[in-house]
Amino acid sequence: MNRTKMKNDLSRKVFTHTVNDCWQCLDYKTFYMTIRPTNLETDKMKGYDPNHYMLSPNFCESVLCKSLPEAFTRGYDMADEEYELRYPGLKNVI
């Protein structure tokens, strides 16, 4: 897929379901994010609730969220804020 087609592919700009109940967003305002349930052994060792989710954006530390809708909303909001910090004034262009 060439660069122009990737840029215009709307499916890359939203969270899509992948394997093991995980979600990924490939290209929301140039950022990549994943969401996964906190049910791994390392999560249990850290005391995380297995019914919560971990949001992992490529531009900052991972964030623990209590629900999947919260993780979606928080991911988009964080990406919007980061994009505005990096590119002031371009908020409404993309």
Image (cartoon, rainbow, N blue to C red):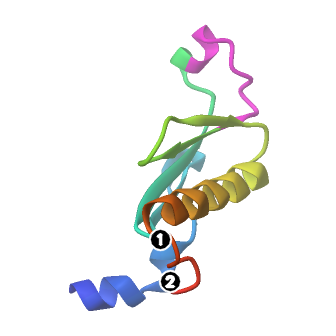
Relative placement, left or right, of 38 versus 93 is: right
Front one among 43 and 93 = 93
Residue identifier under label 1: 29
Q: Can residue 54 be seen here?
A: yes
Give the magenta part as a residue range: 43-53
**Position of 37 relative to 82 (above/below):** above
Provide the major secondary structure of the magenta segment: loop
- Who comes first in sequence, dot 1 or dot 2? 1
Of 40 and 80, the residue lying toward us: 80
* Placement of the N terminus among the 4 image quadrants: bottom left
Towards the viewer: 24 or 92? 92
Q: Is residue 7 left or right of residue 20?
A: left
Within-10-Å neighbours for mark 2: few <14, some 14–19, many 20+? few
**Circle 2 SS class:** loop
65 magenta-colored: no
Q: Amino acid at mark 1?
A: Lys
Side (left or right) of 64 relative to 9: right
Give the class, few, some or many, for how many residues have Cα within 10 Å of label 1's Cα (few <14, many ≥20): some
Q: Which quadrant of the structure image shows residue 26? A: bottom left
Look at the numbered disc 1 and give the secondary structure of its residue: loop
Q: Visible in this render: residue 1?
A: no
Residue pictured at 24% horizontal, 84% vertical:
3
Q: Are marks 1 and 2 in contact (CB under 8 Å)?
A: yes
Picture residue at 55% right of the left edge, 24% below the top: 40
**Location of residue 44 in the rendering, given as x and y in whole percent from the top left corner:** 63, 15
